[in-house]
Amino acid sequence: MSGDPITRLTLRRPDDWHLHLRDGAMLRAVAPHSAAHFGRAIVMPNLVPPVVTGAEALAYRGRILEALPEGSDFEPLMTLYLTEDTDPADVAAAHAEGIATAVKLYPAGATTNSASGVRDFDKVRPVLDKMAEIGMPLCVHGEVTNADIDIFDREKVFIDKVLKPIRKANPDLRVVMEHVTTQDAVDYVRDNPRNLAATITTHHLIINRNAILAGGIRPHYYCLPVAKRETHRVALVQAAISGDGRFFLGTDSAPHTDARKLEPCGCAGIFSAPVTMSCLAEVFETAGRLKQLERFTSLNGPAFYKLPPNEETITLVKGDPLEGPAHIGTDDGAVTVFDPGFPLHWRVEA
Ligand code: NCD
Ligand code: ZN
C-alpha cells in the first residue's frame, strides 16, 4: 500500500499561460475568478477590435487591473495580436517596456475573433525575426483554416505545413504551441526540445469528442481546437503528469454568454476558470501523480517564460463534492461553467 491518501496539498500559486478575460461587463465578471486562484495569466488579445499595438495592450491592461477585486495582486501578462501590418519596432518597444510578454499568432479565421490574423506568413517574417532576436515568445494557435482540411486534422496539418517551416526559418524563435489537442503535437514538442513548449487546457485533459457529439449535441463542450478522440486525450494527460518542463497549464478559459453558445452557429469556447484547480487535482489524483501538479500549474510555465515562480502558495483540500454554481451571472447574460462530468472533491482553501 502507498500510505495514507493525500487530502491536503500545498503548492506554489499557479499561473494560467493562456486565458481570455474579454472586456467590459464580461471582464468584470470573470477576472475575479482567475484572480482568486492564479498569480499571473497570459491574456489573449482577441478582442473586437484586437489588441495589436503596445499602446492598446497598455490600455487593456489598465482595464483588467480595474476589474480586479480590492487588494488583488493578480498580474496580467499581455500579448499582442499579430497582424500582417504589425510593426516590429512597436513589438520590440512594448517588450522592452514590460508592456507585452508575448505575441499571439492566429491564422486568419481559425477561431473566435481571428479575422485580423495572418494569411501570408511571409508578411510577418520581419516581426518574427525581431522577436527571435529579443527572445520574445510567440504563442501559436496551431490550426490551419483551409476548408478542405478536416477539422479534426487541422492541428496536425498546421505542424507540418506552417509550424515546421516557421521554426526552420527561425530556429531562435521561442514558440508556445497553445492548447495542444493531439498525440501528434505532444510528440512534436517532445522531439524538438529547443525553444518549444506547449500549453494544455483543463478541458482537453478531461473530455474527448464524444462529450460534444454523443447522445445529443452539447455546445458547452465545443471549443477550438475541437476535442479529439480518446487516444489523444490520454496522450495529453501523459504529457501533463509527466513533469516534463515543456508542458504547462493554459486553461483557455473562454467565456461566452449562454445565448451566444446556444445559437444555431454557436461560439467556440469553454469557461473553466472557477473550477480548473479542482478539475486538475482530480485528473492528477486519478493518475496517481498529485505531487506533479505543481510542476504543471506553477513551475514549468515560469521556467519557459523566464520568470520566477510565484512565492505565495495555495492549498487544495479534499472533502465532500463541490456544490459549485453551474453558471455565473454577468451583465451580458449567464455564462455556463465547465462541467467535467464527475464530482469535484478538491477545493482551493480560502
Ligand atoms: C477562444 C475564444 O472564445 O476566444 N475560443 C476557444 O474555443 N478556445 C479562442 C481560441 O482560443 O481559440
Ligand atoms: Zn484561447
Image (tube, grey):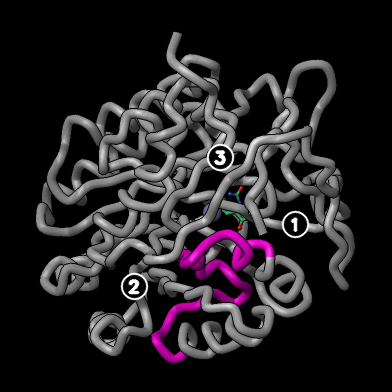
| Of 229 and 68, the residue lying toward us | 68
Q: Which is in the foreground here, disc 2 or disc 3? A: 3
What are the residue bounds of the magenta stretch? Answer: 33-55
**Which is more foreground, mark 3 or mark 1?**
3
Badge 2 element: strand
**Tag 1 residue:** 256
Count the numbered circles shown: 3
Residue 282 coordinates in the image, percent (x, y): 59, 30
Give amino acid for label 1: His
Q: Percent position (x, y) of residue 141?
A: 43, 50
Q: Which dot marks residue 101?
A: 2
Question: Given the image, on which type of amino acid does mark 3 rest?
Answer: Arg
Mark 1 residue CB less than 8 A from any atom of ligand 1: yes
Q: Judge whether residue 142 can be spotted in this image.
A: no
Q: Quadrant of the N terminus?
A: top left
Q: Is mark 3 within 8 Å of ligand 2?
A: no
Of residues 227 and 148, the one nearer the viewer is 227
Q: Amino acid at mark 2?
A: Thr
Q: Is residue 154 magenta?
A: no
